[in-house]
Amino acid sequence: MKIKYLEDLNTLVSLSKRRGFVFQSSEIYGGLGSCWDYGPLGSLMKLNVKRAWWNAMTRRQDIVGLDASILMHPMVWKASGHVDGFSDPLVDCKECKTRFRADNTESYLKDKKCPNCGSKNLSEPRQFNLMFKTHMGPVEDSGSVVYLRPETAQGHFVNFLNCQQSSRYKVPFGIAAIGKSFRNEITPGNFIFRTREFEQMEMQFFVKPGTDAQFFEMWKEIRWGFYKKYGIKTDNLEFHPHGEGELAHYAKAAVDVHYRFPMGFSELEGIHNRGDFDLTQHMKFSGKSLEYFDEATKEKFIPYVIETAVGCDRLFLAFLCDAYREEITTSEKGEDVRVVLGLHPEIAPIKAAVLPLSKKEELAGPAEKLRAQLAEDFDVQYDEAGSIGKRYRRQDEIGTPFCCTVDFDSLNDGAVTVRHRETMQQERVNMTQLNAYVAAKLKNFSAN
Ligand code: GAP
């Protein structure tokens, strides 16, 4: 058997549409640039991605959760540096009217040429702010401007003392949040890799200055472990430390986790030592103290922050890319291709499928009962259309770990055949035991 892994993102784009993972937004109107909708399977899987991250963070003894609003006081973005600094340099071609980024367009960096028509009749680079602006209230004037947040992190900083005091946690401790962010990206693309509306999963860990380097290393290790636990192939992951010139305005040290997407290794997550930049800025702009008082040592200090920030959509894409495989077998009958999403079962949208061997009421009745029984604990699918082999393949393609076939023997022995996605092996399991069986398998699944 030959195994082929994902080579082209388009393979995933079409599988996603065909099977209901991701659709183009507003498709019947021709779509809206770089906006995507998560379909029946995609919305389930996205919840699983979020749950995995959320549990990994907030079930620790030293991290609390937060769900901050998208619209914040405009001064937040002045203090954070986004109003003045969150921009890309744009150049206009006066001949063909193309607008492009000055800092990553090869033809411009090399010869000061338009990437579209090659003209040198270009404007000077102008800074283009990436934040989406809107107005709050009925009057659209400069006094009512608010921004859609470009990162969730600022919610953590302005709520640092609220979270710390209400939960009575001591530094070091962290705040975790999942939520939508918006950036008017100049060059979105690669499916859901870079979009203008996306979800972030960010955690800020507040530590005593001087201990920051040690916690930075600790979080690098923890985040690597997370990807390993959920079965991402370590060959497809690497750390990319930022050099001096690459560091964001707030960062003392930074490393990105890169994933080998079909277009090459690209950023999946950022792990940054932000120092006390953000809390200090918010103290300055709000006039309120965000200092922490350490009861034990009677010291007051502004904590340093280690941040871990990953895009939910980007991680969703990494999971799909990593899981996709084609198993190709050649025989005298020709070539057979089994498409499998080898997703970790916690991430897979459907945990088990119930497949009655025939549509006859005799089997459909108990099969439907079994579906309802499994659905008390898991997301399940019921499928009675087509041959059993075809139905197995349909489930393989969406990553369902277990298929449970109800056959005529089931009527006598009360058992079903459980077929495993990875090995295609089958075993008989009593229906009354099935929820416990699936739960145990999901818990003990080891991807590596
Ligand atoms: N608070 C720090 C921060 O926002 P970032 O590197 O700009 O850092 C963190 O973003 C993560 O958010 C990225 O590693 C990426 O996974 C995701 N992300 C950023 N911009 C994105 C976009 N336009 N589309 C999808 N995901 C994005």
Image (tube, helix red, strand yellow):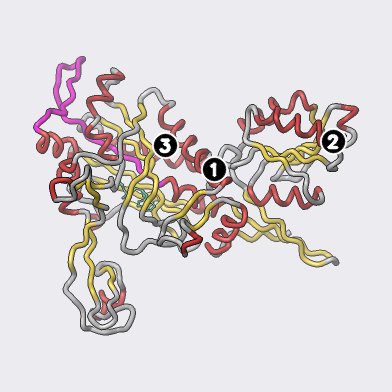
What residue sits 43% from the left and 45% below the top?
312
Specify whether residue 292 is painted magenta.
yes
Specify whether residue 297 is painted magenta.
yes
| Residue range of the region highlighted in magenta in the rendering | 287-311
What residue sits 50% from the left and 53% below the top?
236
- The answer to whether residue 448 shows anywhere in this view is no
Q: Secondary structure at mark 2?
A: helix
Position of 304 with respect to 359 (left or right) is: left
Say which amino acid is labelled 1: Met
The Cα atoms of the two marked residues, 1 and 2, are separated by 30 Å
Quarter of the image with the N terminus in it: bottom right
> Is 335 drawn above or below residue 60 in the view shown?
below
Q: Secondary structure at mark 1?
A: helix
Residue wearing tag 1: 45
Position of 358 with respect to 45 (left or right) is: right
Q: Secondary structure at mark 3?
A: helix
Say which amino acid is labelled 2: Leu
- The answer to whether residue 156 shows anywhere in this view is yes
What residue sits 81% from the left and 48% below the top?
388
Residue wearing tag 2: 363
Disc 1 CB within 8 Å of nearest ligand 1 atom: no
Which mark is first along the chain, 2 or 3?
3
Foreground tag (1 vs 2): 2
The Cα atoms of the two marked residues, 3 and 1, are separated by 23 Å
Say which amino acid is labelled 3: Ile
How crowded is the residue under tag 2: few (<14 C-alpha within 10 Å), some, or many (20+)?
A: some
Foreground tag (3 vs 2): 2
**Quick one: which residue is furthest to the front in this view?**
138
Residue 442 in the image, given as x and y percentages of width and height: 63, 33
Residue 344 in the image, given as x and y percentages of width and height: 59, 41
